[in-house]
Image (cartoon, rainbow, N blue to C red):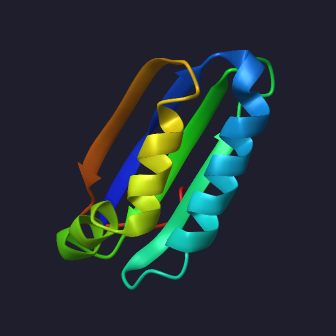
């Protein structure tokens, strides 16, 4: 399994546009083969900060995701949000289980 996690910081004045773009991206991505989860969440204290968390079955599923029309549309939308910082990391996960 592959996990993608990170954050996107943007101009807080663009929060509504960022929310709309993120909602549409989540909706489209959830139907992709190999997608386990795909979530944007808003920071409760900072209106210009979203977190992203994704789980993918394998690298092939993630590679396909990056080639979709909705990814191209989302990347275009990011250009209008006044992105200030984007830090997103990829993790290779060998096992998953409960904390306790």
Q: Is residue 98 left or right of residue 48?
A: left
Figure quadrant of the C terminus: bottom right
Q: Residue at x 71, y 38 (%)?
A: 17
Front residue (pair 93, 60) = 60
Q: Would you place residue 52 above or below residue 8 in this image? A: below
Residue at 63 percent of width and 49 percent of height: 21
Residue 47 visible = no
In the image, 95: left or right of 97? Answer: left
Residue 19 is at least partly visible in this image: yes
Q: Nearer the viewer, residue 34 or 81?
A: 81
Q: Quadrant of residue 49?
A: top right
User: Which residue lies at the image location 32% right of the left edge and 76% below the top edge?
Assistant: 57
Q: Does residue 90 sit above or below 71 in this rendering?
A: above
Count of numbered circles on the image: 0
Residue pictured at 36% horizontal, 56% vertical: 3
Expressed as whole percent of the image width and height from the top left, the position of residue 99 reads 53, 56
Indicate whether 70 appears above or below 89: below
């Amino acid at each position: 399994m592959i996990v993608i996690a990170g954050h996107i910081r943007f101009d807080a004045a663009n929060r509504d546009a960022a929310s709309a773009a993120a909602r549409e991206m989540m909706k489209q991505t959830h139907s992709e083969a190999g997608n386990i989860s795909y979530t944007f969440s808003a920071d409760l204290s900072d209106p210009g900060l979203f977190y992203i968390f994704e789980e993918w079955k394998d690298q092939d599923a993630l590679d396909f995701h990056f080639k979709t029309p909705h990814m191209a549309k989302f990347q275009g939308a990011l250009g209008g949000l006044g992105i200030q910082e984007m830090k997103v990391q990829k993790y290779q996960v060998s096992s998953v289980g409960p904390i306790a």
